[in-house]
Image (spheres, grey):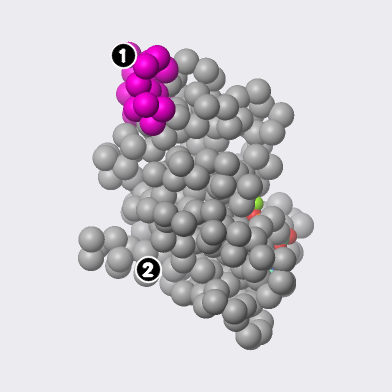
Amino acid sequence: MRVAIVGKGGVGKTTIAGTLARILARRGRKVLALDLDPNPGLGWSLGMEPSEIALPAGIAVHTEGLPRPLAWKLAEGTTAAAELERYAEPAPDGVTYLCPGKIWGASFLEEHSLFAVREIVRGTTEAGWDIVTDIDAATAVSCGRFLEFAEQLYVVTTPQRASAITARRLQDLLIAWPLTMLASMSQGEADHDCLAPKARIPFDETVKDADRRGVPLIEAFPDSPVVAAVDELATQLLEADAAG
Ligand SMILES: Nc1ncnc2c1ncn2[C@@H]1O[C@H](COP(=O)(O)OP(=O)(O)O)[C@@H](O)[C@H]1O
Ligand SMILES: [Mg+2]
């Protein structure tokens, strides 16, 4: 199962992605939490110390003369499992965390790095992993052609209009992908036009409290209604996955 959480900054993507990854892992799934947001976040949300690990050049190699999507392959002699072993980091609850690099890292979003991620995602999918990707809107668009890393794109909105504008842009730009709307920080407001959510994550003050304390929500406030809503989302995802 491959899910990406996408949307405007500040809508709650990283909170949802980190909590979802841990809930899936607690249910016994092998989970890769993939951090494609160039700003720090998913590692924090999972409960990890910040790290500077990035995918170096050379994992994916380019062959001249082939169409672009086919031109990149993992380098001879390596496998997705081997690269994951080398560059991924363990996170709480048995989640595996991978980040191709942050804004200050030279490799972030360079072609070799994205294709390396794509190949690692392909390999781990075949090996039965769940992949939860945290990705900001701009990055999602700039790497739309790499969206094989997700079969399910959850577009997160809040009651704020700006988040709906971003969601509509994503609908226009990512036309080939089925987008599912997810209402975050919801306090009973009316839905945005044409953006009816499939699921709702309530507003809950404890999220900010956990954030300020630097403790993952699922540890600081396991009874938060936000954890319950993400748990419900996990159930829906697993049911859909089991139904094929
Ligand atoms: N359901 C929620 N209720 C209240 N505050 C939230 C909720 N989800 C996230 N927040 C807060 O909103 C801010 C942005 O959340 P974050 O998950 O980092 O969003 P994004 O990854 O989309 O930028 C953080 O301060 C976080 O604590
Ligand atoms: Mg974020």
In this rendering, position of residue 77 left or right of residue 196 = left
In this rendering, position of residue 16 left or right of residue 118 = right
**Real-space CA distance between mark 2 and mark 1, rounded to the nearest whole angstrom:** 38 Å
Amino acid, disc 1? Gly
Say which of 164 and 4 sits in front: 164
Q: Residues within 10 Å of mark 1 (few under 14, many from 20)?
A: few
Magenta stretch contains residue 35: no
User: Which of the labelled discs sits on residue 235, or is there none?
Assistant: 2
Callout 1: helix, strand or loop? loop
Q: In the rendering, at what x and y percent does residue 56 appear?
A: 54, 20
Amino acid, disc 2? Thr
Magenta stretch contains residue 73: yes
Mark earlier in primary sequence (2, 1): 1
Magenta part of the chain: 61-83
In this rendering, position of residue 167 left or right of residue 91 = right
Q: Residue furthest right?
A: 212
Can residue 216 be spotted in the picture?
no
Q: In the rendering, at what x and y percent does residue 66 appear?
A: 35, 21
- Please give the name of the residue rendered at 34% of the width and 53% of the height, measured from the top-left corner: 1
Location of residue 157 with respect to 46 vertically, above or below:
below
Callout 2: helix, strand or loop? helix
